[in-house]
């Protein structure tokens, strides 16, 4: 994970963001809130999104040809959809001195280099949607061409949106996608199902929804802040023969939550691998 961010140093760096949709805008907002003087440039064809980027303090243009001719970014963040990435990449190959950070799911280093050049310094990053509120999880894989300064700058910028960690095997990105990339949807569904179960037990639906959401949020924060392993926390709230134990007998049965979650993550991992193959 990244340590304390040296924003006084980063403010002097130049960053180019390609695409300012939901995730790109969330990252940019984090950067500019932490250091409004960051030299950030954005390419975004949608006029409304471009206006939002400009409002955050970035120099926003509609097309790569509109960028300053002398622009020399240290990092180029690629925040466009995977299906349009191959068409977008050749316009940025001219920034050969930069490291390219891609947040496109399933887009491999090989695919990125097809458009950027064989020797391009590339960082694949898998963020997740809680990055929009500064509570994301970003996992990165750097190619050997990525220098220490570029890696540190990437980690510092991403840390404005949450936690950052690194892997040294690109093949693990599909597993990362299955756990943290797709994981928020699993938690949202847990909230849905817990609320529905509460309503089925007789609670008014608004109260059941509130109980489910607050319980998941509170338990997650306790697990994150306490430093106690989730399994130990589970044991601490489970009295032998009590109500929690009765529920866990169902959830921890041989056909319960663990094998179901394992199958779900594997399905997401396998699908990510399929998408990477095109």
Image (tube, rainbow, N blue to C red):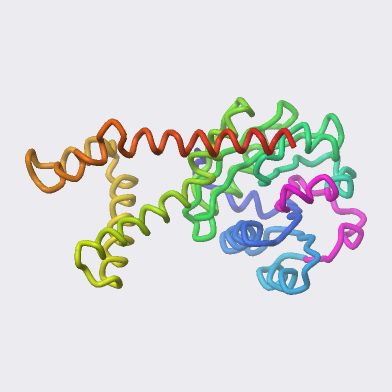
Total numbered labels placed on residues in the image:
0
Residue 5, given in percent of the width and then of the height, sits at 54, 48
Q: Position of residue 179 (x, y in %)?
A: 48, 39
Q: Quadrant of residue 275?
A: top right
Is 68 contained in the magenta span?
yes
Q: Of 204 and 150, which appears nearest the observer?
A: 204
Q: Nearer the viewer, residue 259 or 175?
A: 259
Report the residue at 77% width, 69% height from top: 46
Residue 56 percent coordinates (x, y)? 66, 69
Left or right side of 249 for 25: right
Question: Does residue 79 appear left or right of residue 264 in this picture?
Answer: right
Could you tell me residue 175's position as x and y percent?
Answer: 54, 33
In this view, the residue in front, 116 or 164, is: 116
Asked if residue 116 lies left or right of residue 1, the reply is right
Q: Residue furthest left?
A: 241
270 to 164, vertically: above or below: above
In front of the other: 82 or 201 = 201
- In magenta stretch: residue 35: no
* Residue in the picture at 73% in, 55% down: 17
The image shows residue 143, relative to residue 206, as above or below, that is: above
Specify the segment rendered in magenta.
Answer: 60-88
Residue 143 vs 217, above or below: the answer is: above
Quadrant of the snapshot with the C terminus? top right
Say which residue appears at 22% left-offset and 36% top-offset: 232
């Amino acid at each position: 994970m990244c340590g304390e961010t040296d924003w006084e140093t980063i403010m002097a760096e130049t960053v180019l963001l390609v695409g300012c949709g939901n995730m790109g805008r969330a990252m940019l907002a984090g950067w500019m809130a932490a250091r409004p003087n960051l030299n950030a440039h954005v390419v975004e064809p949608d006029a409304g999104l471009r206006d939002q980027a400009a409002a955050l303090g970035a120099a926003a243009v509609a097309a790569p040809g509109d960028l300053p001719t002398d622009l020399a970014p240290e990092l180029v963040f690629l925040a466009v959809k995977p299906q349009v990435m191959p068409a977008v990449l050749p316009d940025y190959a001219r920034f050969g001195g930069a490291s390219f950070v891609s947040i496109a799911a399933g887009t491999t280093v090989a695919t990125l280099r097809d458009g950027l050049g064989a020797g391009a310094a590339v960082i694949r990053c898998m963020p997740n949607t809680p990055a929009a509120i500064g509570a994301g999880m970003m996992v990165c894989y750097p190619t050997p061409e990525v220098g220490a300064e570029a890696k540190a700058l990437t980690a510092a910028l991403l840390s404005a949106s949450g936690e950052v960690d690194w892997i040294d095997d690109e093949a693990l990105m599909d597993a990362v996608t299955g756990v943290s990339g797709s994981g928020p949807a699993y938690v949202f569904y847990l909230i849905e199902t817990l609320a529905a179960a509460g309503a089925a037990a007789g609670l008014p639906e608004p109260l059941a929804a509130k109980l489910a959401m607050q319980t998941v949020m509170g338990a997650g924060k306790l697990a994150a802040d306490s430093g106690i392993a989730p399994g130990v926390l589970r044991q601490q709230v489970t009295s032998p023969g009590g109500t929690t134990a009765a529920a866990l007998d169902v959830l921890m049965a041989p056909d319960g939550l663990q094998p179901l979650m394992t199958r779900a993550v594997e399905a997401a991992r396998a699908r990510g691998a399929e998408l990477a193959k095109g």
